[in-house]
Image: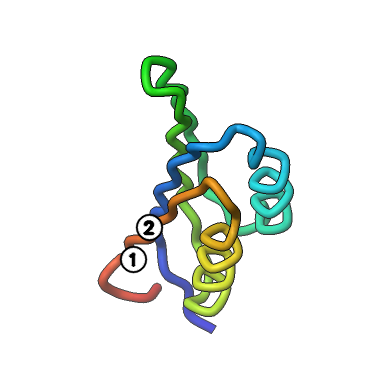
Amino acid sequence: METRIALIGIIVEDMNSTDKLNSILHEYSQYMVGRMGIPYRQKNVGIISVVIDATNDIISSLSGKLGMIEGISVKTMYSKTAK
């Protein structure tokens, strides 16, 4: 099955949600190309970008699970073509 590259942008507004967030990300670690986290202390939020190479179904599943966590905002951007 063809895969796509996607960038998942995550804003963490409730730091108590990070255990659940990290647990879900760990479930999908085999598809991750990279991850970068930036603490924005002045606003008391965390900003995380995750690059993933997976099928549309897997990317959507991960994005959906992350979006259901209280205190987390998620947006996903896909590459235009599958590889």
Based on the displayed image, in which of its 4 quarters is residue 18 positioned?
top right
For disc 2, the neighbor class at 10 Å (few under 14, some 14 to 19, many from 20) is some
Q: Position of residue 83 (x, y in %)?
A: 40, 73
Rendered residue at 50%/39% (across/down): 12
Which image quarter: residue 43?
top left
The residue at the point 57 percent across, 58 percent down is 66
Position of residue 62 relative to residue 17, above or below, is below
Residue 75: mark = 2
- Label 1 crowd (10 A; few <14 / some 14-19 / many >=20): some
Q: Residue at x 54, y 68 (%)?
A: 64
Mark pair 2, 1: CA separation:
10 Å
Residue drawn at x 50%, y 61% as measured from the top left: 53
Give the residue type at disc 2.
Lys
Which quadrant: the N terminus? bottom right
Mark number displayed over residue 44: none
Residue 29 image offset from top left, x and y in percent: 66, 52
Q: Amino acid at mark 1?
A: Tyr
Q: Position of residue 25 (x, y in %)?
A: 64, 50
Residue 78 badge: 1
Left or right, 5 with reference to 20: left
Locate residue 73, reporting x and y percent: 44, 51
Asked whether the residues under the numbered discs 2 and 1 touch, taking CB atoms below 8 Å apart as contact, a structural biologist would say no
Relative placement, left or right, of 19 versus 71 is right
The residue closer to the viewer here, 32 or 72, is 72
| In this view, 83 is above or below 34 | below
Q: Nearer the viewer, residue 75 or 77?
A: 75
